[in-house]
Amino acid sequence: MAILSDRDIKKYLKEGLIVINPLDDFEHQIQPSSVDLKIGSEFKTFQIISKPCIDPKDQIDIDSYMQSFHIGENESFIIHPGEFALATTLEKVHVPNNLVARVEGRSSMGRLGITMHVTAGFIDPGFQGNITLEISNIGKMPVALYPGQRVCQIVFETMTSPSEIPYGHPSRNSKYMGQTRPESSRIKNDYEIKENKI
């Protein structure tokens, strides 16, 4: 696998093979080997509930455990130490079938104690939609996040060949294809849970 350089990212964007929309700050968002992405205005956090745990086999919609927030212009979302939140990229992304992408936090955010992805930063070939960000504050101070702020970066890598069955293919259980808002876990739709294999 090879990471696309800024030269190749620009080429793929120009040819419409990679789509990032809107990309309204081309000069500042395209980095030497990645593209900075901005955070949107919708956030979700877990509410305190009386259940002892979140059970993936429970058929209750996990979204019902979450509270949604819409942050207005010039307002901020404050993420406190130890807190976890979902947000989404402002940009809609389309990854072609011959590339895979990863979302990484920006160094400037990491130095504030803010992680943008702990385990789920992998974007499959064929994915289309806004990327849900899983944000944690591992620092000791609350941090303000502003809609439109560059908080993460997307890196594109070539594959040995185009994917035979890309994300979004009708035969795949592509639970997050086409998402436009922060999406709660849809783990209850995993085949091993739906088919009672565990």
Image (cartoon, rainbow, N blue to C red):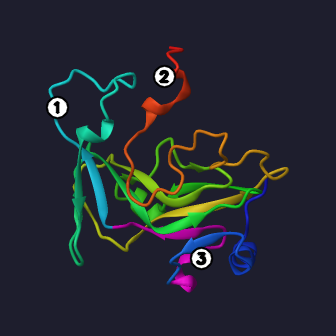
Of residues 108 and 51, the one nearer the viewer is: 51
The disc placed on residue 49 is 1
- Identify the residue shown where x is 66% and y is 68%: 33
Q: Earlier in the sequence, mark 1 or mark 3?
A: 3
Q: Earlier in the sequence, mark 3 or mark 2?
A: 3
Of residues 71 and 172, the one nearer the viewer is: 172
- Identify the residue shown where x is 43% and y is 61%: 180
Quadrant housing residue 173: top right
Identity, as a three-letter code, of the amino acid under mark 1: Ile
Q: CA distance from mark 1 to mark 3?
A: 42 Å
Q: Position of residue 171 (x, y in %)?
A: 67, 40
> In the structure shown, which secondary structural element does the residue marked by tag 2 occupy?
helix
Identity, as a three-letter code, of the amino acid under mark 3: Ile
Q: Please give the residue where the numbered disc 3 appears in the rendered image.
A: 30
Magenta stretch, residue numbers: 25-40
The disc placed on residue 193 is 2
- Rendered view: 142 above or below 65: below
- Circle 1 or circle 3, nearest the eye: 1
> In the structure shown, which secondary structural element does the residue marked by tag 3 occupy?
loop
Identity, as a three-letter code, of the amino acid under mark 2: Ile
Q: CA distance from mark 1 to mark 2?
A: 23 Å
- Circle 1 or circle 2, nearest the eye: 2
